[in-house]
Amino acid sequence: MCGITGIAGIHSDPEKRRSAVKAMTDSISHRGPDAEGIWQDHDVCLGHRRLSIIDLSEAGNQPFFSQDNRYVIVYNGELYNFRELKLELQRAQFGSGQVPYIFKTNTDTEVILVAYMRWGKECLNYFNGMFAFAIWDTQEKHLFVVRDRLGVKPLYYSFINGQFIFASEIRAMLNSGCISRKLSATSVAEYIQYQTVHAPNTILEDVKMLMPGYYLEFSGAKLSATQYWNINQYTKSKEDLTYQQTCEGVNQLLTESVERRLVADVPFGAFLSGGIDSSAVVGLMSKVSSEPVETFHVSFDEREFSEAHYASLISKRFHTKHHEIRLKPSDFLAQLPEALAAIDHPTGDGPNTYIVSKATRQAGITMALSGLGGDELFAGYDIFKRFYELDKKSWLNAAPRFMRSMAGSVISQRKKSVQGDKTAEILSAPHIDGLNAYPVNRKLFNPKDYAALMGKSSDDSKYLRERLKHIQTDKEHVLSRCSLYEIQTYMQNVLLRDTDQMSMAVALEVREPFLDYKLVEFALGVKDEYKYPHTPKKLLVDALVDLLPPEIINRPKMGFSLPWKEWLKNELRDFCENNLVEFSKRGIVDRGVLLDLWNRFLANDPKITWSRLWHIVVLNHWMKLNQVEN
């Protein structure tokens, strides 16, 4: 797990290019405190910061060269099946003229490079892991840049006037001095509504994010993008499996995924919230590991925010070495400034991950497993049930739209809540279906407040609809369609991005067993009748029969919660108010409307929750820290 940077282009000055890559690489030293490397050819300069996880010797430092020095790679991530591929590459193929490759290290880096040398771009079909890497061919002057299938590892890039720049973080791009520090007006509008910017766009005008499952090729002054894995192709059952066979398939694939992710030459552990997903990961780790698993749980004195009881129950069941890190809200607040300073891309939901990651790293752990992805694959959120039931109510479209709008207005007025507004908006849509309803569920503002805030009336759901309209499934896979919506929006553009930037800020590697692509492909092909959420994640629970106790299965879903509402009104009030006032003067939003929203929040208006303002506070703070202008 590392950080990578690079600049390529025949028109760039070599000395300036090297200086820029040095500045970029230095700015992400937190991602790789163990080693630094910079290498330059006539047309390219590559940089690397290393966090040693596999083969801790200096032989694994990067940039890494093939034995004939033709190819050089910088790589961030982990290839979980590198040992199997290494054996394959050490064999000669009969009649092919290929000879066994003699490896000089025990790294997965060398396996990736040799696989590319043997199979070319087809090597990606062999890889199982989380990764972002760049390979330069010194002979052909060709750069090959890749991001993993699910988008666990980030890769940002810019292509201006024939010059290609890439890095693991946006801040590295800014520190290159080669791009403008200017916001994208379109992205800011999207961020304000959804508390994130969806790839391939970023908050900056000149920076893009490589989409998951894609690779880039740069040669001369030309850049092209190609998709090598399409997640939307796996929502049809390949065969008519029984429920028991489906459970067995989930069990086998998840067990194998956990086992693959335990390969490391450093101390490792697991995040344990006490929920179904993290408990399942810890249970399987204990099953396949010869040593007791180290588990980490952050708890709070306030009972309403604490899940310590459930985490302790799982720890005792699987005999883990449990670390309960007790924090008071004041402890969290004390660390909030450094958490905000660690944010790479603005986010409304990152500090929680930072606090957990920092505590885990301080306990001597360099790699941790997470339960991220379980909800998205196995219908763990409430939205799955609403989505499924909405699909069965297509008869609503027979009613005239004006009548539906009237009914929605009545509901909104009676409920006087955020959910009431969302119900009203869904009912008034031109067509009631998942594609129109899903963006509404993820929005922060109702159309009236958003239009007033942005100073214009607009179709504020278009950002997500455009990204999701190509996703189609049959009637047996409605829940898988919702999974695809969740994975390609909130999970990839909030959860995974936050996990990477906040864990790597403290040099901690996080691995997600639920995001093994083989498990993802299998789960997406499971029909609705096996996944319908009558009980929490029934398919996953049944697949792990006897692993999880009833107290965990039937417990209320909490998540990692903190008293943000109270903080914004008290301890963080001055900080928030100062940032909101500053942002209101930037000309991005209507100043009076923004400050009125803040006052409505302070007056306990039920429609203005803390999350509708906090992400704007974060954005303004991020802009100041990174000297970004609109």
Image: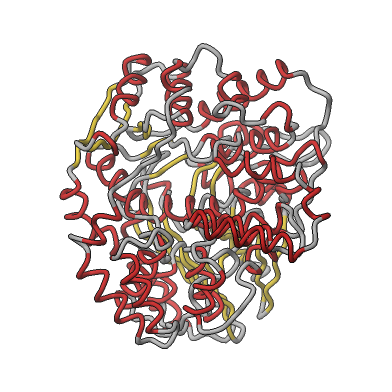
Instruction: Name the outermost residue toward the top.
Output: 546
Can you say whether 121 is above or below 8 in the image?
A: above
Q: How is the image coloured?
A: secondary structure
Q: State the image coordinates of residue 239 (x, y, percent, origin top left).
A: 83, 27
Residue at image location 38% in from the left, 58% down from the top: 49
Q: State the image coordinates of residue 446 (x, y, percent, origin top left).
A: 53, 66
* Residue 611 figure quarter: bottom left
Query: Total of numbered circles in the picture?
Result: 0
Position of 511 with respect to 411 (left or right) is left
Camera sees residue 120: no
Position of 75 with respect to 172 (left or right) is right
In this rendered view, identify the residue nearer to me: 474 or 340.
474
Q: State the image coordinates of residue 63 (x, y, percent, origin top left).
A: 46, 58
Can you say whether 376 is above or below 396 in the image?
A: above
Q: State the image coordinates of residue 412 (x, y, percent, origin top left).
A: 55, 59
Q: What is the quadrant of the C terminus in the image?
A: bottom left
In this rendered view, identify the residue nearer to me: 160 or 397.
397
In this rendered view, identify the residue nearer to me: 232 or 391.
391
Camera sees residue 260: yes
Residue at image location 41% in from the left, 18% down from the top: 551
